[in-house]
Amino acid sequence: MMIYTEKVIPFENRAGGKGTGILRIAMEDEQLEGRAKSIMSVTLHPGSSIGSHQHVGNMEIYYVLKGEGIFTVNGKSEPIRAGQAGSMNPGDWHSIENTGSEDMLISAVILYE
C-alpha cells in the first residue's frame, strides 16, 4: 500500500472560467501506473466556474459531493447537484459553474481512452 500527499493548487479564472477555486490532485498517472491520468477534487467557490475545455485522449467523470451548479457538455447545459455524476467522452468540450450559495465540491477522475 502506498500513501500519497495531495498537490493543492489554488486557481483563478481556470480555463477561461470566472472566479476562484482549489484543485487538489490526489494521484497522477505515475502513481496510478498508467491506469488513469489523475484523481482529484475541485472546490468551486460560489459564482465561480471552470471554463469550457477538452481532454483529447481522455474521458473525465465528475461526482458532485457538495453544492449545486450547471454542467455543460458540448453546448448542452444541465443542472447538477450533490449526489449526481456526469461524464465527458474524449474530446468533449465541457465546463461547470457553481450556481449555489456555498462551495461546490467535486470529485473528478480522468481516465485514459
Image (cartoon, grey):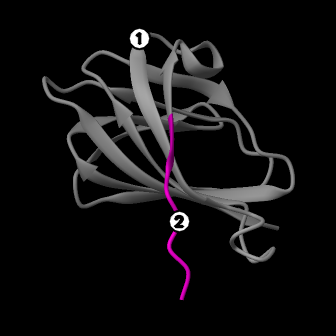
Could you tell me which quadrant the C terminus lies in? bottom right
Q: Residue furthest bottom?
A: 1
Residue 4 tag number: 2
SS type, badge 2: loop
What residue do we see at 50% from left, 73% from top?
3
Could you tell me which quadrant the N terminus lies in? bottom right
Q: Amino acid at mark 2?
A: Tyr
What residue do we see at 49% from left, 57% from top?
5
Position of 81 with respect to 12 (left or right) is: left
Q: CA distance from mark 2 to mark 1?
A: 29 Å
Residue 89 in sight:
no
Q: Main secondary structure of the magenta part?
A: loop
Marks 2 and 1 in Cβ contact (< 8 Å): no
Residue 88 or residue 1, whichever sits in front: 1
Q: Residues within 10 Å of mark 1 (few under 14, many from 20)?
A: some
What residue do we see at 62% from left, 13% from top?
16
Q: Can residue 102 be found in the magenta stretch?
A: no
Residue 91 or residue 110, whichever sits in front: 110
Q: Which residues are magenta?
A: 1-8
Provide the residue designation for mark 1: 19
Q: Position of residue 29 (x, y in %)?
A: 75, 64
- On screen, residue 67 above or below 25: above
Q: Position of residue 102 (x, y in %)?
A: 15, 28
Q: Can residue 4 be found in the magenta stretch?
A: yes
Mark 2 and mark 1 lie on one chain; the one further toward the N terminus is 2
Q: Amino acid at mark 1?
A: Gly
Q: Position of residue 37 (x, y in %)?
A: 73, 61
SS type, badge 1: loop
